[in-house]
Amino acid sequence: MTAERVPTDPDQLADYLSVQPAASLVVVDGAVTASNQEAIEVLGIPSARLIGAPFVELFVPELADPVAAALADTLPLLRAFRVRLNRGLIPIEVTVRSLDGHTALVSVRDLTFEHELSAAGNGSLTHDPITSLPNRYHLLERLNSHLTAPNTQPVALLGLWIDDLATLEADRGPRVTQRVVRQVGERIHGRLRGPDLLGRYGDDAFLVVMASGMDADQLTAVADRLRNEIAFPVEVEGGLVSFTASVAVGALGRQRPSLERILARLAAASDRASAANTNRTEILSF
């Protein structure tokens, strides 16, 4: 059996795509130059907007690096990545086949169905392997759905960061920090109500979406209490590991902010917590 010959000329590639059974695109020098109808349907982007667009900009920025690296590779290898579309955080599998230093044949596959099955079974697509809590992207997907829902139920967001976790890992190793992260997740979960949603937002961070109509003073009291209750020593390998935590909390009003605005506020709060390197509570304005 001989290997399939894929044309490298852009015009020939466009014809080649039209008979492909899967969602496929041609990317030349990082930009989409051709697409079949299946790819347009999967990505949910009209052809007029898709053609000419930088390919990596279709995805959540922090997940785009491996795709960009594969596009720049000159080796004729297949590389597959699970990423998220910027549009609605839809989970996508991207397979990149480099044809030369400029051109790549890319296929895309919607993972929504697999994602739903994974969520039902706490699988690796949707849940953090250390804490078994929803991972960052499943959490943000749920939050985005809430932001775009027609209801106006009062909601508050609470972000919690374990202070200077990187130093703890450098001193004691990853097994210790994993134990601390797992314990913190369990402690937060044990203090939430049924409707509240908790997930692991980052290596040292958790995010809680709370049904709440509390004012700033009440939210501060809740955040202070949670911060003090979860930051007591964790027993690891016959000894105790001490740490502190920082918390940022804020209410979402009837006029819902965008997910991008929320992420920017949380990132700034994380930076301030890292700079202060001590247990603190901050009120966020979304």
Image (cartoon, rainbow, N blue to C red):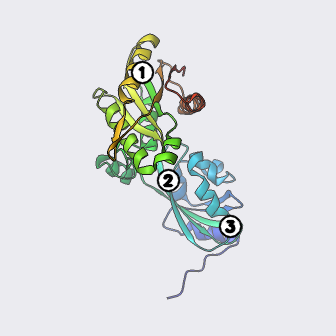
Q: Quadrant of residue 217?
A: top left
Q: Judge the density around disc 3: few (<14), some (14-19), many (≥20) Cα neighbours within 10 Å.
A: many
Mark 3 and mark 2: Cα distance apart in space: 21 Å
Estimate the x, y position of residue 149 in percent, counting from the top left.
42, 29
Q: At x 29% / y 47%, what residue is drawn?
A: 120
SS at circle 1: helix
Point out the frontmost of discs 1 and 3. Answer: 1
Q: Which residue is mark 3?
A: 103
Using the image, determine if residue 8 lies above or below residue 202.
below
Point out the frontmost of discs 3 and 2. Answer: 3
In the image: residue 171, left or right of residue 175: right
Point out the frontmost of discs 2 and 1. Answer: 1
Which residue is more in the foreground, 63 or 235? Answer: 235
In the image: residue 14, left or right of residue 278: right
Mark 1 and mark 3: Cα distance apart in space: 51 Å
Q: Judge the density around disc 2: few (<14), some (14-19), many (≥20) Cα neighbours within 10 Å.
A: some
Amino acid at dot 3: Thr
Amino acid at dot 2: Val
Amino acid at dot 1: Ala
Using the image, determine if residue 37 lies above or below residue 182.
below
Residue 74 visible from this viewpoint: yes
Q: At x 54% / y 22%, what residue is drawn?
A: 286
Q: Badges 3 and 2: C-beta atoms under 8 Å apart?
A: no
Q: Which residue is mark 1?
A: 223
Q: Which residue is mark 2?
A: 42
Estimate the x, y position of residue 220 in percent, counting from the top left.
44, 16
